[in-house]
Image: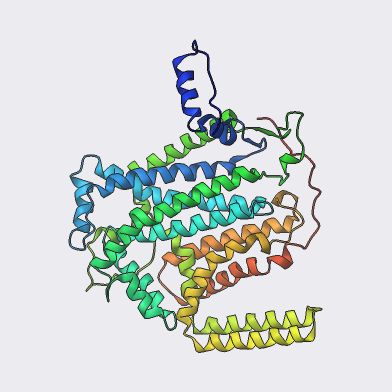
Amino acid sequence: MAELKEISPDAPVGAKLLNWVDNRFPASKLYKEHIGEYYAPKNFNFWYVFGSLALLVLVIQIVTGIFLTMNYKPDAAQAFGSVEYIMRDVPWGWLIRYMHSTGASAFFIVVYLHMFRGLIYGSYRKPRELIWIFGCAIFLALMAEAFMGYLLPWGQMSYWGAQVIVNLFAAIPFIGPDLALLIRGDYVVGDATLNRFFAFHVIAVPLVLLGLVVAHLIALHEVGSNNPDGVEIKATKDAKGNPLDGIPFHPYYTVHDIFAVSVFLLVFTAIIFFAPEAGGYFLEYNNFIPADSLKTPSHIAPVWYFTPFYSMLRAITGEMMYALVACVVAAAAFTVLKSRLAAMFKIGVLVAAAGLIAVMLMIDAKFWGVVVMGGAVIILFFLPWLDNSEVKSIRYRPDWHKYMYATFVVVFIVLGYLGIKPPSPINERVSQVGTLFYFGFFLLMPWWSRLGTFKRVPDRVTFAAH
């Protein structure tokens, strides 16, 4: 049992209360370790505000979600009407609903920017691999949460979007039909599906999401934050053991984040009050029509934050399978010709490649589309081991690496745009090229990330007061 700390009888009431709490719960200790005496690099820039903004949006989504569940009915016959009731009759219900729907898009915007910052500054490199893995798990849970929440308004796009996505699981060999039936809870998307998705959206996935966020923050504070230079600030410390290139998170970065939050809330509220549908991108117009199982919309597409992955799904056609087979053949030939390993290993590579090609041609392209869509997210988990660059930060990499990352961003945005548009031959070809580039960017990273002349990384962080 820890010894109780004593305090002067003449101390202020607040100090006595804090001492009473500290003797029973490490409030002051937690504050010092994670805020007051948590030293962050002093050269943080604009890109380092999106983690705090993601936390803010998570709180907004939880609070608004609680208020929405007070009036929402998870019933196929009443769900759409209950949303209309919230919008029209519940005091300030329209504001809560628009905050939640706009918050969903805002969440993905800040998370995408947060992940891009990690990508360009090498925040996934040793010793921060686990931070990155927790972050990717958060992204995966966020996608599940958003998909399940998208069904709840029970509009036309909610219903048919869920119908399309759930039916994709039926393409999985052997277990597909049973898995799709398990997800739906019925032979068609209906009341059972709505209840399942409501339970997962409101209880199960948020608990997982909160747990992952806590794990992400604990892992971050254990090894310390990365910075734009990719320099470890713990390498140089003063006599007290504090990093020379670090500053306490509070008050320096709390003020920094408060300013970012203020700007974010200005934009966020402007969208809520003046353009909550964002031209049909945040709230699709078809979703203001009650779900009708007998009337299919002319074009079914997911919300914008899923569309890059939806484009990759649609890109996998019978013709595209031959291109993928050619990629497997090229990879096997390159491995055999360039590898210095034993002949038995090379024979094993050829046999494995032949087996993979046979499986690829035997199974329907629809299944491989699902694999590619899922693989586009799963491959992010392996980024710490794919990047073989000598340095972490983009600042000290060859200039052409910057063009590579810029091209990756453009391709991702183009894939997102094409995912919204109806299918066409030209859109299909562009999506196929974009899909090949997306996976090539990661799968070839062990090779291309080593190429070029790297700049010298400074021993201390570069910092200019502002």
Question: Is residue 275 visible in this depiction of the protein?
Answer: no
Position of 438 relative to 124 (above/below): below
Foreground: 191 or 241?
241
Foreground: 223 or 84?
223
Q: Position of residue 172 (x, y in %)?
A: 44, 79
The total number of labels drawn is 0
Q: Position of residue 143 (x, y in %)?
A: 44, 59
Position of 176 relative to 417 (above/below): below
Coloring basis for residues: rainbow
Q: Position of residue 149 (x, y in %)?
A: 34, 57
Q: Position of residue 45 (x, y in %)?
A: 62, 39
Quarter of the rendering occupied by the N terminus: top right
Residue at 76 percent of width and 56 percent of height: 398
Foreground: 174 or 268?
174
Residue at 53 percent of width and 45 percent of height: 51
Foreground: 300 or 371?
371
Q: Does 25 sit left or right of 422 as displayed? A: right
